Image: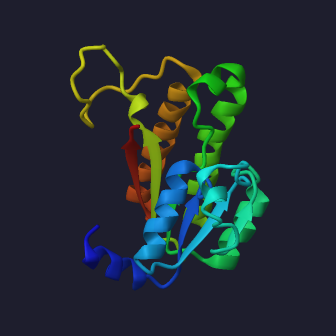
């Protein structure tokens, strides 16, 4: 990672909030930001036994709360207490097979959780940017084997990928709100395995 980026992140007036910080990617991002000396806070479900976060013994290393991203009041209070300058939103129900068993919950967590983050970020005067992490599974897959590009059409066939397309739609809506009314910069990043 560029050292100048680390300097810029350390210069922010508030910490960076990572939602989903106990997940696999969230754990690695927490490690990276800690390595760069960036102030970080975390909002996530409790780590599962023997997950990377648990094995790395990260519990309590940063200010954190274990709560559901759909719990709006708890999220709002945490945000107001820590006043992050930026939010990296990764809290999600991330498992394709689980999404077949619990499709409604998958849609609720992945779409309404994202809506909660965006809505509260825009209500706060201290949040400068929100990065929403979705997945490369949001792209229509024609099974051609070619790499996806950002301009490819979106389409989710299973509950997980469809819920992430919904999260992308929320990002687009709040990007439009930002253009019309101001507010934090909102971007989406689509990470693959």
**Residue drawn at the location 36% of the way across and 27% of the way down:** 139
**Residue drawn at the location 51% of the way across and 65% of the way down:** 30
In the rendered view of the protein, which quadrant contains the C terminus? top left
Residue closest to the far top:
143
- Above or below, 58 against 149 in this view is below
Query: Which x, y percent locates residue 111?
Result: 60, 39
Query: Which x, y percent locates residue 157?
Result: 49, 17
Q: Is residue 87 visible?
A: no
Q: Is residue 162 visible?
A: yes
- Above or below, 54 against 134 in this view is below
- Above or below, 78 against 148 in this view is below
**Residue drawn at the location 50% of the way across and 51% of the way down:** 25
The quarter of the picture where residue 78 lies is bottom right
In the foreground, 79 or 68: 68
In the foreground, 142 or 177: 142
In the foreground, 105 or 32: 32
Q: Is residue 32 left or right of residue 109?
A: left
In the foreground, 62 or 178: 62
In the rendered view of the protein, which quadrant contains the N terminus? bottom left
Q: Is residue 103 left or right of residue 146?
A: right
Query: Which x, y percent locates residue 144?
Result: 24, 14
């Amino acid at each position: 990672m560029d050292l100048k980026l680390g300097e810029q992140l350390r210069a922010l007036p508030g910490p960076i909030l990572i939602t989903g910080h106990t997940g696999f990617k969230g754990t690695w991002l927490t490690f990276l930001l800690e390595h760069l000396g960036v102030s970080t806070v975390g909002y996530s479900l409790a780590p599962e036994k023997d997950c990377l976060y648990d094995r790395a013994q990260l519990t309590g290393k940063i200010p954190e709360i274990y709560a559901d991203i759909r719990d709006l009041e708890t999220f709002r209070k945490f945000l107001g207490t820590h006043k992050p300058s930026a939010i990296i939103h990764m809290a999600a129900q991330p498992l394709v097979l689980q999404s077949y068993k619990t499709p409604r919950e998958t849609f609720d967590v992945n779409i309404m959780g994202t809506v909660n983050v965006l809505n509260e970020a825009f209500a706060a005067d201290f949040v400068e940017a929100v990065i929403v992490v979705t997945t490369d599974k949001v792209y229509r897959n024609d099974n051609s084997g070619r790499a996806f590009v950002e301009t490819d059409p979106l389409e989710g066939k299973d509950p997980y990928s469809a819920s992430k397309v919904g999260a992308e739609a929320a990002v687009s809506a709040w990007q439009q709100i930002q253009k019309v009314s101001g507010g934090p910069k909102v971007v989406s990043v689509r990470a693959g395995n």
